[in-house]
Image: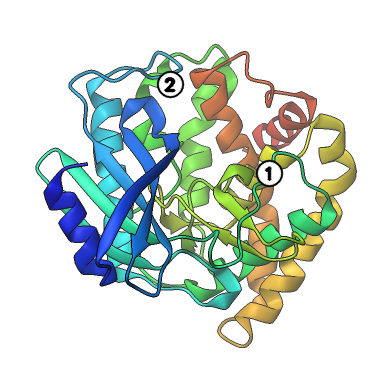
Amino acid sequence: MKQEYQDLILEATGAEALLIGDKIQTLWSGYGEIVRVHLEGCDRPSVIVKHVVFPQKSAHPGGWNTDLSHLRKVRSYQVETHWYQNYSTDSGCRVPVCLAARSFGDEQLIVLEDLDVAGFDQRRTKVGIKEMKACLRWLAHFHARFLGIAPEGLWPIGTYWHLETRPDELEAMADQDLKAAAGKIDQILNSCRFKTIVHGDAKLANFCFSRQGSEVAAVDFQYVGGGCGMKDLVYFLGSCLEEKECEKQVPDLLDYYFLELRGAVGDQVNVDELEAEWREMFAYAWTDFHRFLLGWMPGHRKINKYSKRLTREVLRKL
């Protein structure tokens, strides 16, 4: 790590010395890495550093190595930096504290609180009802906190699969009926009366759990932006549940989310009208992500009977 990057970390933390620790992960398509940095002489034993490097050539796992794809990723890291510098949450929707964020030409550094130290040291690849409810509670509080807030400096429309940013994937779709309806579905979602700021990539892997699994914090805000809260909900549920589990568990989990949302929103808005609109948007949001998958990776495991059933229901309504 370059000396100027180390100097930034020392300045942000007040540490006397640092030691570069293990790499936690490589960023998508080889755009850098996330590492743990150990500190000496300050009140923090460690921090997490997201080091973004914009490559001359990227290695996208799905083969989508286009200029548009590259520009979308560059913009996503700019958005994430702006998010950490200008937005804040509370204990109901915990995120890591940003200690510093700076651009160095084609590289960016974001210095974040180490959530492991804060008690969120568990990661889950499989979850039960308790863990799913913890994540749904986080999403409900997040959506309530930013209800009616304009996404200034963020994506005008959040989520990484937003139609306007995915013309190549739309063109590649074989399902002509859904392809023709994609713009209408997008319009319906975007014209919601009740809008919030969505996480935009609220999959299970982006939640850090407490030891007992009853509390969570969220990371990875590259695609945070405006929109209907159901976009986060459908993406999260799809990251946890297999086809048959969706049929059995989604109704109760949806009820739980709205119970938490009602409590978090309070008297900000007419919550009955909010819930009615977003429940109506659930199938549209699920279909919108299904549209993306069909163009991006038509053999994806999430393309299942549950998704196809909701898509048929939406197409019949149009």
One can see residue 153 in this view = no
Residue 155 place in picture, x, y as percent: 33, 52
Q: Quadrant of residue 262?
A: bottom right
Residue lying at the far left of the rendered structure: 105
In the depicted structure, whether residue 212 falls above or below residue 247 = below
Residue at the spot of label 1: 283
Which amino acid type is marked by label 1? Ala
87 vs 147, nearest the viewer: 87
Compare marks 2 and 1 and give the one earlier in the sequence.
Answer: 2
Task: Tell me the quarter of the picture where residue 140 sits.
Answer: bottom right
Which dot marks residue 221? none
Quarter of the picture containing the C terminus is top right
Secondary structure found at label 1 = helix
Way the structure is coloured: rainbow
Position of 80 with respect to 237 (left or right) is left
Q: Secondary structure at mark 2?
A: helix
Q: For marks 2 and 1, give the one nearer the viewer.
A: 2
Asked whether disc 2 touches disc 1, contact meaning CB atoms under 8 Å apart, the reply is no
**Image height of 271 relative to 138, above or below:** below
Q: Which mark is residue 169?
A: 2
Picture residue at 45% right of the left edge, 13% below the top: 172
In this rendering, position of residue 261 left or right of residue 10: right
Residue 11 location (% of width, % of height): 19, 67
Q: In the picture, which quadrant includes the N terminus? A: top left
Farthest bottom residue in view: 267
